[in-house]
Amino acid sequence: MNLYGRSLIKVDDLKANEFFYLVKLATTLKHAKQNGVEVPELVGKKIALIFEKPSTRTRSAFEVAALDQGAHPVYIGPGESHLGVEESPADTGKVLSRMYDGIEFRGFTQESVEGLDQAADVPVWNGLTDMWHPTQMLADVLTMTEHTSKEFGRVVLTYVGDGRNNTARSLLVTGALLGFEIRIVSPKELTLEDTSVLLAKQLAENSGARLVMTENIEWGLHGTDFLYTDVWLSMGEPEEAWKERIDLLREYQVNEAMMRATHNPEVKFMHCLPSLHDQHSATGARLSKLMGTDGVEVTNEVFSSQASIVFDQAENRLHTIKALMLASLRGH
Ligand code: CP
Ligand code: NVA
């Protein structure tokens, strides 16, 4: 496996064996850190972290992974560079690659991260755009492998909610690439555009993945191993859209009844986070009232239950992002 010098801009930049290789490397790195025997292999490397949008997990995962490995991360937050305002992604990519060894980018358009990557001489990693969230997928697959005893090709993951956001698109294409069964359950107003569906279908022809896209909650849930949801309004979408979104998605809330409707007592609940699952955040409090339930896309009851593996997912952002940086910068 040689991922040296490679960027990760969208999920299908990786082949299935490369994806699984990164997940395996992340497992090794996770154990090394837990046992206090991690070997820093990125000493002296400088990593630029560009964020046009907020982040808790992605930023922390890149920073801590870099620090664990002896590299030096530099955070460039929203409004702190000229990117997109006074300077093109291409010019920024050229400049940063004369100073840094790798560039992480979180922002709005996929064109920005592609422009950076095309101009940069160093690896560029997409830390989320409106289209894709590939580093999240590495963490999710690691977490799934930790919580199933099934052969991976037999696993079923059902995503319920906004079926055309970055997470839904990324999950569909990840399932299609790796060959597990992926179901996207959403109202027809919130389904993916044809190009992503076509891409997933082409990948599924090779991998044998089963793809299901449906409005039918009962059908989508039956027998699933992992029930996944995400926020109903993604970063960058207008606040005014909340009311319409709640009207569309109210019956797609993950609650105890939905967990039971999987008919799988072992089903696990997943969420990339952040989540509006209770009233202890400003938005969570405001919208829980509007919903009339404790939680928006998921109830606090499910979020806090034994079935919930969301904090394993969050921790695994660190180990998988570390694996990605090592593979890109050291050729692991
Ligand atoms: N899941 C995720 O990307 O979280 P952050 O927005 O906190 O980085
Ligand atoms: N769909 C969400 C994912 C957050 C990690 C968003 O883009 O805001």
Image (cartoon, rainbow, N blue to C red):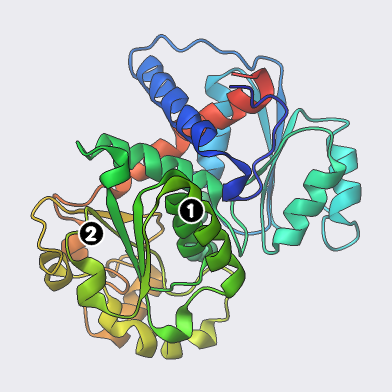
Give the residue number, with chain letter if any, for mark 1. 205
Give the residue number, with chain letter if any, for mark 2. 303
- Up the image or down, 239 lies above or below 19; here it is below
- Up the image or down, 5 lies above or below 220; here it is above
Residue drawn 71% across the image and 21% down it: 45
**Amino acid at dot 2:** Phe
Coordinates of residue 102 in the picture (x, y in percent): 72, 32
**Amino acid at dot 1:** Glu
Residue drawn 44% across the image and 31% down it: 23
- Left or right, 237 with respect to 112, comes to left
SS at circle 2:
helix
Coordinates of residue 329 in the picture (x, y in percent): 68, 23
SS at circle 1:
helix
- Left or right, 22 with respect to 231, comes to right
The quarter of the displayed image where residue 272 is located: bottom left
Please tell me which residue lies in front, 37 or 288.
Answer: 37
